[in-house]
Structures are given as C-alpha cells and as structure tokens.
Amino acid sequence: MLARLGPAPAAQSADVIARAVGAVALAALAMIHVIDLPGTLGAIPLVGAGYLGIIAAAVLVGALMIARSHWLVWAAAGALAASAMGGYVLTRTVGGFLGDHGDVGNWRCPLGIAALSVETLLILLVVLAAWQARAHATSPARRPRPVARRVPEYSQPR
C-alpha cells in the first residue's frame, strides 16, 4: 500500500525545487529576450523572429515545468537553452549569420552575458534532473514489508 504513495518526500521536494528554479530561469531567459527584442525586429528581422521563438518556447516550457515533472519537459528546456546559446555564439563568430553583421566579436554585451548565464544554469539543471532520475530508476525498489500481526494475549497457549 505504501508503494503506491509515490517517491519519498525528500525526492519530491528536490524535484519541486529544481522545477521552480528551472521555471524562474526560463522566465528570466524570456525576459532578457523581451528586453533586447525592439533592437532586433526592424534591423535584423531573422534574429527578431528567433527572439520571438525563444520567448514563446521559454514561456510554454516554463508553464509545462510548473505543471508537471517529465523528462520531455526537461529535454525541451535543455534544447531551448542550448539552441539560444548556439545562436548567440554563431552571431558572434560567423559574419552575417541570420543577417547580423554588427555583433561579430561583440562578447561584452550585458544582456548576452546574462542570457548565457541563465542558459548555463538551465543546462546544469537538466543534467541534475537527469542524474536524479537515473539515481531514482537504479535504486532498488522498496517493497512493503508485511506487518507482523499481534496476537492477543488471551489467545496464546500457556
């Protein structure tokens, strides 16, 4: 009967904390891109479209992360962080990537550094969630022990 109650409270609370931090990090990632969005929509429309995609995906994945713990939600958060990080690196290294010629070599952008920090945090959280899931899956299943029945004293032979 106890096996049906779910994981131990410590495992549940660690998952809730990781999901809360992940949801806040996704909200921060969306906010960083909202702040930087006006400068990209007119001048560099492809980068602006990428920002809109990052914002929408961060809000959606953050909402899913709050609602439920699932490995696909963590995978989506990791993929979003890695793709946003990859886009930042490509716009700084490849001249003309997505029509962005002005950011090549501009590694000191404060919003870019903030975004890289949040994306790194998200990737580390995904690794932590995968490690916790693996540890939980490989731990031996706890089987409920049979409860010893207490025999009343008057029914015991003397």
Image (tube, helix red, strand yellow):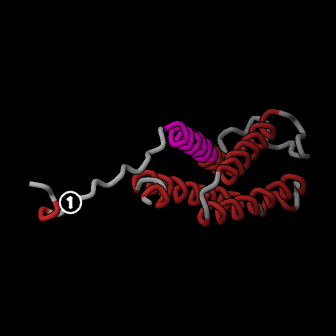
The answer to whether residue 113 shows anywhere in this view is no
Q: Please state if 140 lies on the left or on the right of 152 as rendered.
A: right
Looking at the rendered image, the quarter that the N terminus falls into is bottom left
Residue 56 image point, x, y percent = 76, 63
Residue 20 point in image, percent of width and height: 52, 59
Viewer-closest of 146 and 11: 146
Q: Foreground residue, 112 or 59?
A: 59
Q: Let me know if residue 5 is in the magenta part.
A: no
Q: Which residues are magenta?
A: 119-139
Residue lying at 64% horizontally and 44% vertically, measured from the top left: 116
Q: As rendered, which of 137 and 115 lies closer to the eye?
A: 137
Residue 155 in the image: x percent, y percent?
A: 16, 62
Amino acid on which the number 1 mark rests in the picture: Val
Residue at far front of view: 158
Q: Which residue is mark 1?
A: 151
Residue displayed at 68% across by 51% down: 77
Compared with residue 56, is residue 135 higher up or lower down, i.e. above or below? above
Q: Is 75 positioned to the left or the right of 13 in the image?
A: right
Judged from the image, the secondary structure of the residue bearing numbered disc 1 is: loop
Residue closer to the observer: 102 or 84: 84
* Quarter occupied by the C terminus: bottom left
Query: Is residue 114 something one can see in this rendering?
Result: yes
Give the main secondary structure of the magenta stretch. helix
Q: x%, y% of residue 51?
A: 79, 57
Q: Residue at x 84, y 52 (%)?
A: 47
Q: Residues within 10 Å of mark 1 (few under 14, many from 20)?
A: few
Q: Residue furthest left?
A: 158
Q: Which residue does the image show at 40% across and 51% down from the upper left?
A: 144
The image shows a total of numbered marks equal to 1
Question: Can you tell which quarter of the image residue 37 is in?
Answer: bottom right
Left or right for 67, reference 106:
left
